[in-house]
Image (tube, rainbow, N blue to C red):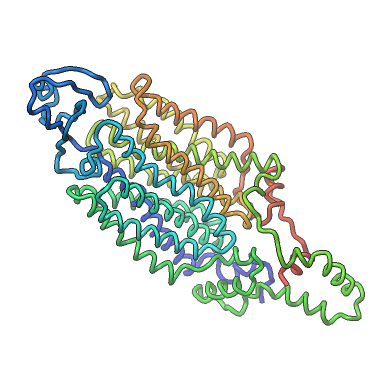
Amino acid sequence: MSKGDFESNLEAAGSFGKAQWILVFMNLYIMGYSGWQTYIPVFSTRKVDFYCIDSRNNSKVNLVDLYSNLQTMKLSEVFESNGSEFDQICVDHCSQYVYKSKPDSIVSEFNLACGSDTFLVAFSNSIYFIACFISCFVSGYLCDKYGRKNVAFFLIIIQCLSTTGIIFTHNIYLYIGLRFVAGFGTLTTSIDYIIFAESADKKILSKMGLTIMISFVLGEFSCILCGYFIQGSWHLQFAVLAVPGYVYAVLHFFFMPESARWLHSQKKYARAEEVLKKIAKINNRDPLTIHLYDTDENLANNFQNSETSSSTQNLIEATSDESDSDVRLPTTPSLLDLFKTVPSALLTLSGALSWFSASLVYYGLTYDVQNIGGDFYLNAILLTFTEIPAWFVCLAMDKFGRLRTFYISLFICSIACAILPFTAPLLNGNLQIAFAVLGKFLSTGAFDSLYVYTPEQLPTVLRTTGITFCSAAARIASICAPFIIEIKAGPYNSVPFIIFAVSGLITCISVFLVGVETKDKPYITTIEEYQQLAHTKEVKQIQNKVEAPLSGA
């Protein structure tokens, strides 16, 4: 019979067996689907060659090029310089633009190639992450209060329904609205990963967590294949995208368990024990060895049966009046608890800044693929598959530690971003592509490491809330990225990449100064342990031998 504490019961149930492999498969699936959802705007908002129909009836017109420079040129000169009738030149007060039939995108269908309408294209990319940002706070609170599974299932359902709605959309504002709704479903990936992390052996999280991250790349590659073979209809691309979402919703309903660790932290010992027994059964372990609340029951029985023991009776009477209200109505931890002390506040902010910087570079390079010279699809494949080798870089976490691996990766990435724009005239742009690949490679490595590093820092009672707060910072960066890459300023339009570099360097400094190492250290459970970790850089678990059992009675 196992002891009453959670860790020993999880070990008895099997901390990494068939049950955890099912969770790995579920996380691989939803992470791949998230990659597809995130990458599809690269194709649905792709720039399409066009010309102004008015230019066919005038020998000389006032033209505004793509960089908003007013100029006058003969029509024949335009065609000669472009080598094609689709000159991609915005004409002032043009009555109608004509677009190529392929590739099809919202730019051509909703006529968004020129003028202020180009803002709607960038905004349609950002709106998805605005929803992610909002859901970070709402879903984090709901998950910590009502559990992980139900919230995640609700989010994936609304994402599937909104994706289906986009298939039948023929209005840019409705498209933006539905992409906003779809963005709320992105948090399913974080929530389902937390369920896995709280149900598995901590020692294997770095390897399995990074393996799950690779599935995001496979989702992006699936999107590239879909975009390549279905260039004639962006509506059909969304139709294909909706199908695996519904499949996952069914799998999630039947196979995804609630987090036993969360149930235990909420004093719901009976339900937590039930989940662990199911895990034990799947892992071919004896469910009868699982007794989470056995310690509490024995203590309660001892109190009832030891009437001759005045000391025990006095303890019950003393605690009955003083802490009854606290026991029955415990205070729900909130995000503000992570900011109660200066060291814990700095550690929390440093974590959020880390997610912001890694996300800013990652999504900036992802959505900037259209502006890199060379073949569009080849560049997309290179910048996508460079994320796979990042898995091997992150394996260094187990050797050199989480902290050092993260800030070194982000530092080199920042230097690469600072150099990238100035390599445009060298080697026909090939050197620029090489630095873009290097930056994407290292930003992915830094980003992936955070999925292992951040949960290890946060207490169980606020793990979901803390991660979603950091994820919100990442979403702010992803909201900004589509607009930042459109800034045309500085030598070789270098301002966007200077912004990426400065953000990364500031983060490296903050992590170096206040970050903590969590390699080979146990999970922390309470707010007090988190404050202790931030202050001393060491994990010190705080146990209450009397109050904890009574509060669960």
Say whether residue 442 is visible: no
How many numbered callouts? 0
Tell me which corner region of the image, top left, top right, bottom left or bottom right, holds residue 415.
Answer: top left
Which one is in front, 347 or 156? 156
Q: Say left or right for 307 vs 491.
A: right
Q: Residue at x 22, y 36 (%)?
A: 375
Which one is in front, 481 or 30? 481
Q: Residue at x 48, y 43 (%)?
A: 474
In the rendered image, residue 11, in percent from the top left (x then y), is placed at 60, 67
Which residue, as the protein is rendered here, is positioned at the far top?
72
Q: Residue at x 57, y 42 (%)?
A: 351
Q: Say left or right for 100 vs 428.
A: left
In the rendered image, residue 341, in percent from the top left (x then y), is placed at 71, 43
In the rendered image, residue 155, in percent from the top left (x then y), is placed at 44, 59
Q: Residue at x 20, y 28 (%)?
A: 93
Say whether residue 483 is visible: yes
Is 273 rendered above or below residue 325?
below
Q: Say left or right for 28 vs 318.
A: left
In the rendered image, residue 86, in percent from the top left (x then y), is placed at 13, 32
Which one is in front, 487 or 34? 487
- Quadrant position of the C terminus in the picture: bottom right
Tell me which corner region of the image, top left, top right, bottom left or bottom right, holds residue 102.
Answer: top left
Which one is in front, 125 or 273? 125
Tell me which corner region of the image, top left, top right, bottom left or bottom right, holds residue 144.
Answer: bottom right
- Quadrant position of the N terminus in the picture: bottom right
Is 303 rendered above or below residue 120?
below
